Amino acid sequence: MAISNQTILKKMSSEIQEAMLNHGDDHRVREHVRAVKLLADLVLDQDSASQAVPKQKSSVQEPTVEEIRQMMGNDQPVQKQTSAPQSDGHDEANGKSIFDF
């Protein structure tokens, strides 16, 4: 559902008027100015989407799996343990779950 720019501009105008009425309360003024900023961003985002200008890729690359492992302090890849549970004469002991008795 697209909102017309005229509607957004009217809302921006009312937010500016509210900010001017509350000029003594810095907190309320900042809230209204923040609303105006968000509305302006909405108009700008609509314009850029309607022009269908392809965005350039960011020069920042996603980290590789190996880089993530190094950052997390795990230099070696984790290998799943595939050996069977050890049996100490208790056939039903040491199952896969701590609740296996």
Image (cartoon, rainbow, N blue to C red):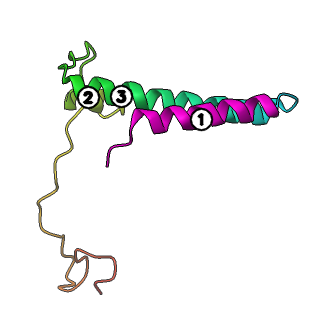
* Residue occupying image coordinates x 25% and y 76%: 94
User: Which amino acid type is marked by label 3?
Assistant: Asp
Could you tell which of marks 1 and 3 lies nearer the N-terminus? Answer: 1
* Residue occupying image coordinates x 33% and y 76%: 98
Which stretch is magenta? 1-21
Q: Quadrant of the C terminus?
A: bottom left
Left or right relative to 13: residue 91: left
Quadrant of residue 57 within the rendered picture: top left
User: Which amino acid type is marked by label 1?
Assistant: Ala
Residue 91 image offset from top left, x and y in percent: 17, 85
* Residue occupying image coordinates x 22% and y 22%: 51
Left or right relative to 24: residue 76: left
Q: Which residue is mark 3?
A: 45
* Residue occupying image coordinates x 77% and y 28%: 20
Residue 87 image offset from top left, x and y in percent: 18, 75
User: Could you give the CA–CA distance between mark 3 and mark 2, rounded to whole angstroms?
Assistant: 6 Å
Which residue is nearer to you in this view: 92 or 82? 82
Residue 19 image offset from top left, x and y in percent: 74, 31
Residue 96, placed above or below residue 55:
below
Quadrant of residue 93 within the rendered picture: bottom left
Q: Residues within 10 Å of mark 2 (few under 14, many from 20)?
A: few
Q: Secondary structure at mark 3?
A: helix
User: Could you give the CA–CA distance between mark 1 and mark 2, rounded to whole angstroms?
Assistant: 21 Å
Could you tell which of marks 1 and 2 lies nearer the N-terminus? Answer: 1
Q: Which residue is mark 2?
A: 49
Residue 38, placed above or below residue 52:
below
User: Could you give the CA–CA distance between mark 1 and mark 3, rounded to whole angstroms?
Assistant: 15 Å
